[in-house]
Amino acid sequence: MAGIVGYGASVPSYRIKVEEIAKVWGDNATALKRGLVVNEKSLPSADEDTATIAVTAARYALARSKIDPKKIGAVYVGSESHPYAVKPTATIVSEAVGAAPELTAADLEFACKAGTAGMQMVMGLVDSDMVEYGLAIGADTSQGAPGDALEYTASAGGAAYIIGKNDTLADINETYSYTSDTPDFYRREGQDYPSHGGRFTGEPAFFKHVTNAAKGLFEKTGTEASDYDHACFHQPNGKFYLKVGKMLGFNKEQLEHGLLTPNIGNTYSGAVPLGLSSILDNAEPGEKIFIVSYGSGAGSDGFTLTVNDEILERKELAPFTADIIDDKQYVDYAVYAKYKGKLKM
């Protein structure tokens, strides 16, 4: 089957701390940090959006892949914050990285799992020999209304994956998805901010879909949590991530490299792709990885991967995810509100 040939991460350098947001709305920052397991979040500057994040991540993925970008036959960008309602982000990315025009490209939307859906689509094209290499990206500059709980977590970032059959650094062994019409989170066309489905958010939405996708993947592969060295799940906050990991039998050591939310917030379509990039930065040949994404509306995509010897050389060819995250600059709420377009004329 297809595997990962190259990967790259991108997170804007600006950060805002939970305390700074809580100060504006009179909330208890200590309780919020404990309940959400989030300390701060990333945000885009005035000249950053989903397209610029996707291009940066794609260029890093190309550097690790060492392939000619003209061999890319498909580009899919998953996001719920594409800069244009009618004008694909995928064409911007393909042109920016030097891909040839003889390719298929499209933007994808499925809340926070559009990036992993793109990975599955590229896998299918590669496995069927329709393309030699494909590029799948999950990236977002997510929205949260002023004073809403989402404002403490909704952030910006993304990761890109070049998938092919040759010279892989990690092989994708299996994938499995679980999907239903569960309306826990939604935003209509023209609305600036999303709405919550209230009681649907936790048990019938996130936990049901993530656990069912994980259990289906366990059954399909004949494995269990103890067979894996690393695991990563969608992370709307750190609390949900740690809880679902424990529910499925994973320990803290297996989960630690994929948990990024405490330091960058919820990057939506970029969350699991970024978590996986962090895991690959720390992985050794022969190690096995288990990941499950989640997108409101609702669905989950699961993957199992095995790292091979190519990881040792290739992960050094682009910046590590941790180094990208550590390159940061704090802003106050006024600058945050300006860059996020919360000030309406």
Image (cartoon, rainbow, N blue to C red):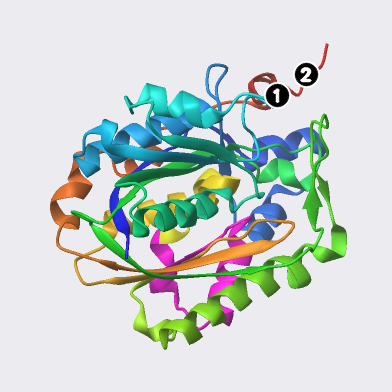
Q: Which residues are magenta?
A: 231-257
Judging depth in this view, the residue of 171 and 21 nearest the camera is: 171
Q: Provide the residue designation for mark 2.
A: 343
- Under circle 1, the secondary element is helix
Which of the two discs, 1 and 2, labels the residue nearer the N terminus? 1
Q: Position of residue 26 (x, y in %)?
A: 81, 40
Q: Residues within 10 Å of mark 2 (few under 14, many from 20)?
A: few
Q: Is residue 56 left or right of residue 86?
A: left
Circle number at residue 293: none
Circle number at residue 337: 1
Q: Position of residue 245 (x, y in %)?
A: 53, 74
The image quarter containing residue 142 is top right
Q: Are marks 1 and 2 in contact (CB under 8 Å)?
A: yes
Q: Position of residue 40 (x, y in %)?
A: 57, 43
Please report the residue visible at 53 percent of the width from the left and 23 percent of the height from the top.
48
Amino acid, disc 2: Leu
Judging depth in this view, the residue of 298 and 342 nearest the camera is: 298
Q: Position of residue 188 (x, y in %)?
A: 83, 39
Say above or below: 216 vs 139: below
Amino acid, disc 1: Ala
Residue 39 seen in the current view: no
Q: Is residue 199 left or right of residue 30?
A: right
